[in-house]
Structures are given as structure tokens and as C-alpha cells.
Amino acid sequence: MTTSQDFSDQPQDDAVELSQWERFGVDTSAPHSARVYDYWLGGKTNFPPDRAMGQAIEQAVPSVKAMAKENRAFQGRAVRYLAREQGIHQFLDLGTGIPTSPNTHEIAEAVSPDTRVVYVDNDPIVLAHARALMVSTPASRTTYIHADLGKPAELLGDPALTSTLDLDRPVGLLMIAVLMLVADEDDPWAKVAALRDALPSGSCLALTHPTQDFDPESVAKVAEAARAGGMTLVPRTREEVAGFFDGWELIEPGVAPVMAWRPDGEPPADPTAAYYWGGVARKL
Ligand SMILES: C[S@@+](CC[C@H](N)C(=O)[O-])C[C@H]1O[C@@H](n2cnc3c(N)ncnc32)[C@H](O)[C@@H]1O
């Protein structure tokens, strides 16, 4: 379903708009991953429960805001790499999040003006902001689909997707900081594999995932804070993250701390300062 309501121009003032959001299916009474993340990135689409959870997590990991920015920086480098070095001009961005500039289409269009991007998220608040993402130019096209990445066949058959992406040509599949929101019992590895099988050869996967590997004690507290707030948040080990790339050919440097993945300029002194694994791979 593509967007029919749009609130991206409205003031983001809690008192004015709480009830308005609720009318459109946004539950503002409990924290939500997209809005907690928006709070860390300095956005304005977040409410008291989101900020409370964001701050609780920040107590366990004081640099969590800087980490979220490193995750976005990886996304920028990966999209630029795919557009420049792999010749990918169409992207499927799953778990888009609340629009945060530069968004995928802005990064890719700077390399290739004829880019196509399909954004997908299942949170109504992202749907409400979709107009900010659906900015097409004479050469480019972007679309937003309100859908669950857990249903890959349905998603790939959505007319909004098939009329935007040419599934006979390579696609850049982005799963940036989203799979930690899918529990083991829902088998996120099988979802990624289904998408891999449906995409043509030459398609690429760029993925990031938070991990406990660099600081098990603090990240255990993060997972506990999320659980207490009713949110699924599963940090995963390098081996578990590498499992998402099964059947893809990893591109150098493989699964790496996001800060160490093809950094612009000098390599960071401590690449494990952001607790995310990241990688980019190609389907043969
Ligand atoms: C932490 S945000 C990440 C946003 C963006 N990818 C980034 O890294 O900046 C995760 C997003 O994934 C979305 N999401 C979670 N589970 C999803 C699902 N099953 N299908 C589609 N989107 C999902 C959330 O609504 C949220 O907007």
C-alpha cells in the first residue's frame, strides 16, 4: 500500500499532535524502534516513551547517538560504493526509518541521476512521512511501500515495487539496522535468503546489525531495556550476522565493524567504538 496520508509538513510538537497521530494508527504510548532511533539521530519525530527508552539505553551505552550516526555513515558509503563501483542504479531499502537526510535516493542520485528507489517500512509513522521520501526528478523515481519485510514474496509482487524496479536488472538490497528487530524464531535468515533468491545475479546486499561482540555487558543492558519497554531487539554475533550473507559473495573487507568498512579518509583509531557489524555482498 502506498501512502495516502502525509503529515511531514506538520509541526512535531507533542502537545499539539499526540491525539492526531493516534487517530492514524500510531501508538505513541509505547516506545518504537523507528522513533527511538530518530531521537538518537537528533530528529523530531519522537514522543516521551521513545525518549525515555532512548535515554535508558544511553545510560548503558553513553555513545549510542554517535553509534547511530556511524551506522548512517556506513549506509552512505555502501550506497555510494554500489552506485559507483557496482553500477547499481536501483535500490530496495527495507526498514527505511523516519526520513533522515541524506536518504538513500539522495546519496544514489548524486552518483547517478537515473536512480530508482523503493522504500519499505511497516511503521505507520514512517508512512505518514513518506512524502519526504517520494521525491522524483525527471530522471529518477522513488516509491514508498507500507509493508512487512517478513513477507518477501508479497513485497516483491507489490505493483508499486514492480512498476518502479526492473527485477531483471541488479538491485541494491539495503537492510540497515533492521534485522535486530526480527526475533530468531521468525527466522530473519530465511527472509534474507528468500529475497536473495528472487533477485537477479549482480544484485548486492548491504546490511548492518548491532552486536554484543565489542561490549557484551553494556549491550546486554540495552537488550534488557528494550525488553522492559516491550520491544524486540536482538544483538547478534559476527557469526550470526555472517549467516545473512550465505549464498552471497562478500566484498572486501567482508563482515567488519561499520566504522572499518571502506572508511572515507584515515581508518578510525578504534573501529569497534560503534557496536554494529556491517557488510556488502554480491549475488553471483
Ligand atoms: C532502527 S530503524 C533503522 C532505519 C534506517 N534503516 C537506518 O539505519 O537509519 C529500523 C526501521 O525498521 C522498521 N522495521 C522493523 N521491522 C520491520 C519489518 N518487519 N518490516 C518493515 N520494516 C520494519 C522500523 O519501523 C524502523 O523504521
Image: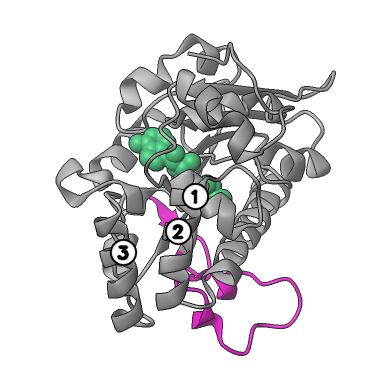
Q: Is residue 236 left or right of residue 80?
A: left
> Quarter-wise, where is residue 138 in the image?
top right
Q: Give the mark nearest the N terminus, 3 or 1.
A: 1
Ligand 1's quadrant is top left
Q: Residue at x 30, y 53 (%)?
A: 229
Q: Residue at x 40, y 47 (%)?
A: 31
Q: Is residue 177 left or right of residue 268?
A: left
Query: Which residue has dot 1 on it?
Result: 48
Give x and y (percent) for residue 182: 29, 46
Q: Which label belongs to residue 225?
A: 3
Q: Residue at x 57, y 20 (%)?
A: 166
Can residue 135 be seen at all in this image of the molecule? yes
Crowding at dot 3, Cα within 10 Å, few <14 / some 14-19 / many 20+, comes out as: some
Identify the main secondary structure in magenta.
loop
The amino acid pointed to by label 1 is Pro
Query: Which residue has dot 2 on it?
Result: 52
Give x and y (percent) for residue 132: 71, 30
